[in-house]
Structure formats: structure tokens, C-alpha cells
Amino acid sequence: VSTQSTGSEVARNLQDEEGNMGWDDLLKFMFQCCKSGDPQLMETALSILTSVPDIFGSAQASYMDLIKELLFISLKNSDHPNVRFSAVRATCAFLNHIGEDEAKKQFSAFVGPLLEGIEDCVAAEDDDGPLKS
């Protein structure tokens, strides 16, 4: 069982009826992983977000700038293709989760990096890449 699987499963079960996350330390862990610069830790956080895109619950609006920053930085990470591929998956999952068109407009700057990540996936012939998301 991987860290991503465990974290994702715990996150799914810790939101209350109002959408409040019952384990704030998991969110802190995810942000620390993304900012660490360690590709494996970054992939872990992005995988959790892919699996549980509503992880921020009712606090999502207050985290939106940080979420955008972490996803954008990860999408632009050309040194580590797997981080970029994970970021494509996480971004797509998150955008599918946020239903409001107005919120999605905030991600217009992501189109270029998303397309670059998908292009890199195709070039790498990555069978487990973002195109499966």
C-alpha cells in the first residue's frame, strides 16, 4: 500500500457533512511535499489530489491561490517528467471537480503548460501518463 493510497483513503473518510476536512495535517503535508523539490514527494501530493480532488472541502476557496501556485509550478517542472505528468492528472481532476465556470476561468494560464505536459507524455510514450486520466 502506497503513501498516496493511504492518504487518499483517509482523506475521503475525514470530511464531514459540511465538507470540512478533519485532518488539517494532511493538507499541510501535501503542501510541504509540493514545495520540497523532491520529485517523489511532489508526485505523492499530486496523486492524493488526483484521487481526492475535493480534499480541501469547504475551505477550498481560501486555498485556491496556493492550489493554483502548486499545480502551476508542478506543471512547469520540465526536469522531472513524472512530476509534470502527475500535475497534468491532478489539474484535470481538480478542474473536473470544481464545477463553477467562474472558478475554472482562474486557470486559463494553465492551458499552455497542460498541453506541454500532454505533449511530453505522448513523446515519452508513457503508458501510465496523463492521457489515461
Image (spheres, grey):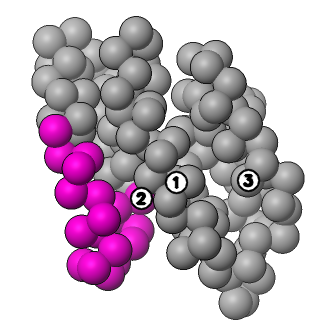
Along the polypeptide, which appears first: circle 3 or circle 1? 3
The quadrant of the image that shows the C terminus is: top left
State the image coordinates of residue 74 (x, y, percent, origin top left). Answer: 44, 32
Q: Image point 34% across, 74% down: which residue?
A: 103
Element carrying mark 1: helix
Residue at 74% in and 79% down? 20
- Our reading of the magenta stretch's main secondary structure is helix
| Residue type, label 2 | Phe
User: Is label 3 or label 1 in front?
Assistant: 1
Q: Please tell me whether mark 2 sits on a helix, a strand or a loop.
A: helix
Name the residue carrying label 2: 94
Say if residue 123 shows up in the picture. Answer: yes
Q: In the image, what residue type sits under mark 3?
A: Leu
Is mark 3 in CB contact (under 8 Å) with mark 2? no
If you read the primary sequence from the N terminus, does the residue marked by circle 3 or circle 2 appear first? 3
**Residue drawn at x 39%, y 40% as measured from the top left:** 72
Location of residue 15 (image quadrant)? bottom right
Residue corresponding to mark 3: 27
Which residue is rendered at x = 29% and y = 58% of the image? 107
**Which residues are drawn in magenta?**
94-112
